[in-house]
């Protein structure tokens, strides 16, 4: 009886205290032991500084360099510098990645160079791929013409210019301003802008109030079908750039990692 119990107990220990005889998973580990580290190959094979034609290290310098900092003709890394550079920060004749600088520059966040594209663009022929509502413009705060008359102050008013034959009608809201005149220097610009909502700067003379400056109010981009088409094209380009960065920058770097 005691011998049978001891044999059963020891068999149970072999099953529960280690790898079961039927287990074939090479990555399994006995209970109480740490599983194998998938990055152990990287830590043992990566050099701190590597000078080779095909360099792989924390700092890699070679014809083809892969590493945290990579310098070479073909460079792949968190920081990549080379003729063809791919990485988080890439500098080269052809640079592709997150933040890039080069003759041909393609950056998901920022691209600076001669030609290329990126979410934010810096360069003569670098196309911005992030839709934008444009920079907010400083617009003067308009007042009512009646208030400016009472106080004899100069200021801006919101008006609408409407052409009629060879005349130009001026409205404040629905009220036509018959005693407000246009300065001769801005008549051509006002006729070119009309019909339009503008801001006009009023100054007072002995003959009555006169407009000597106008500022055309820009239309909101959200209300323009043209801008919606531009934004759609930008988003398609940004998606294509993300796919290209993954294919040519991220995937080659990760495929070189010795994970096994």
Image (cartoon, rainbow, N blue to C red):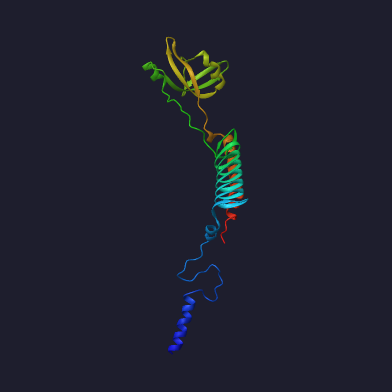
Residue lying at the far top in this picture: please name it.
206
Indicate the quadrant containing the C terminus: top left, top right, bottom left or bottom right: bottom right
- Asked whether residue 232 is in view, the answer is no
Residue lying at the far bottom in this picture: please name it.
1
- Please tell me in which quadrant of the rendered image residue 256 appears: bottom right
- Asked whether residue 196 is in view, the answer is yes
Residue 177 percent across, percent down from the top left: 46, 18
Residue for point 50% across, 14% down: 183
User: Is 213 or 98 nearer to us in this picture?
Assistant: 98
Against 220, is 38 above or below?
below
Total numbered labels: 0
With 244 as the anchor, is 207 left or right in this view?
A: left
Against 97, is 208 above or below?
above
Against 219, is 171 above or below?
above
Residue for point 43% across, 88% down: 2
Indicate the quadrant containing the N terminus: top left, top right, bottom left or bottom right: bottom left
Residue 96 percent across, percent down from the top left: 59, 44
Residue 149 percent across, percent down from the top left: 39, 16
Residue for point 45% across, 19% down: 201
Residue 58 percent across, percent down from the top left: 53, 51
């Amino acid at each position: 009886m005691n011998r049978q119990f001891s044999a059963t107990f020891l068999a149970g220990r072999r099953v529960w205290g280690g790898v079961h005889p039927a287990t074939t998973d090479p990555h399994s580990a006995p209970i109480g032991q740490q599983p194998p580290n998938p990055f152990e190959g990287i830590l043992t094979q990566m050099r701190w500084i590597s000078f080779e034609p095909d360099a792989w290290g924390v700092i890699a310098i070679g014809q083809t360099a892969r590493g945290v900092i990579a310098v070479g003709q073909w460079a792949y890394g968190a920081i990549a510098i080379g003729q063809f550079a791919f990485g988080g920060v890439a500098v080269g004749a052809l640079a592709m990645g997150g933040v890039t600088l080069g003759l041909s520059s393609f950056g998901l966040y920022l691209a600076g160079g001669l030609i290329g594209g990126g979410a934010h663009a810096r360069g003569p022929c670098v196309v911005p791929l992030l839709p934008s509502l444009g920079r907010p413009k400083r617009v003067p705060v308009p007042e009512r013409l009646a208030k400016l008359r009472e106080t004899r102050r100069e200021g801006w008013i919101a008006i609408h210019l409407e052409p009629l034959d060879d005349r130009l009608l001026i409205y404040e809201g629905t009220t036509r301003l018959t005693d407000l005149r246009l300065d001769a220097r801005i008549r051509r610009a006002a006729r070119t802008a009309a019909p339009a909502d503008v801001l006009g700067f009023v100054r007072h003379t002995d003959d009555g109030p006169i407009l000597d400056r106008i500022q055309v109010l820009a239309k909101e981009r959200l209300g323009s079908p043209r801008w919606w088409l531009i934004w759609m094209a930008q988003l398609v380009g940004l998606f294509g750039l993300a796919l290209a960065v993954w294919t040519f920058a991220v995937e080659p770097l990760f495929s070189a990692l010795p994970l096994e």
